[in-house]
Image: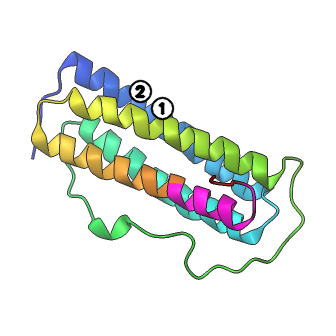
Amino acid sequence: MNITLTQKERMLLEDQKSHEQICIEKYSNYANQAQDNQLKQICKVNEQVERTHLDTINQLLSGNIPQMNQQQNQNPMQNMNNNQTAGGNISDKDICSDLLMTEKYVSGTYDTTIFEFRDTGVRDVLNHIQKEEQKHGESIFKYMESKGMYTVQ
């Protein structure tokens, strides 16, 4: 299905595109710096989903509403072990804190963007991406909680 974007809609999508590019870069860099294999795997899985988000945003910018694959909602916590490996200079806790903060921000910007679109189909696509961003935040939160890095009181 083809759509014609308003100037504001295009600007909002360009913002989301830059956010997705930053998320890809962060997850890629942190996958290489993380000390814990479980965290490395979370970063790698989330990076791949962020690449899908970027592709989706690019399709929207080109005027096409993509079909959303509901099977993308993976849980990076499944089938992982807790082995430790030598890593970079930043602590895993700092990596997680930065990624969690990033996901909170990106999810919030999707919320604003969704409300600014006329087309229900585009809103649905953006809502799907937002839910996946929230799943990323959830996987990081659960990892942090399981490692004693985040205490809910």
Residue at 59 percent of width and 63 percent of height: 142
User: For this view, does 24 lie left or right of residue 147?
Assistant: left
Residue at 67 percent of width and 41 percent of height: 98
User: For this view, does 134 lie left or right of residue 129?
Assistant: right
User: For this view, does 133 lie left or right of residue 122?
Assistant: right
Residue 64 makes an appearance in the image: no
Query: In the image, which disc is placed on residue 15?
Result: 2
Q: Which is more toward the observer, 62 or 74?
A: 74
Query: In the image, which disc is placed on residue 5?
Result: none
Q: Residues within 10 Å of mark 2 (few under 14, many from 20)?
A: some
Magenta span contains residue 141? yes
Percent from the top left, x then y, of residue 30? 71, 51
Helix, strand, or loop for circle 1? Answer: helix
**Total residue callouts:** 2
Residue at 27 percent of width and 64 percent of height: 69
Magenta span contains residue 31? no
- Please identify the quarter of the rendering in which residue 61 is found: top left
Helix, strand, or loop for circle 2? Answer: helix
Q: Which residue is mark 1?
A: 18
Q: Are marks 1 and 2 in contact (CB under 8 Å)?
A: yes
For badge 1, the amino acid type reads Ser
As displayed, is residue 151 above or below residue 14? Answer: below
Q: Which is more toward the observer, 3 or 42?
A: 42
Per the rendered image, the range of residues in magenta is: 138-149
Percent from the top left, x then y, of residue 129? 35, 49
As displayed, is residue 138 above or below residue 78? Answer: above
For badge 2, the amino acid type reads Asp
Residue 22 makes an appearance in the image: yes
Q: Main secondary structure of the magenta part?
A: helix
Task: Give the spatial CA distance, label 1 vs label 2.
Answer: 5 Å
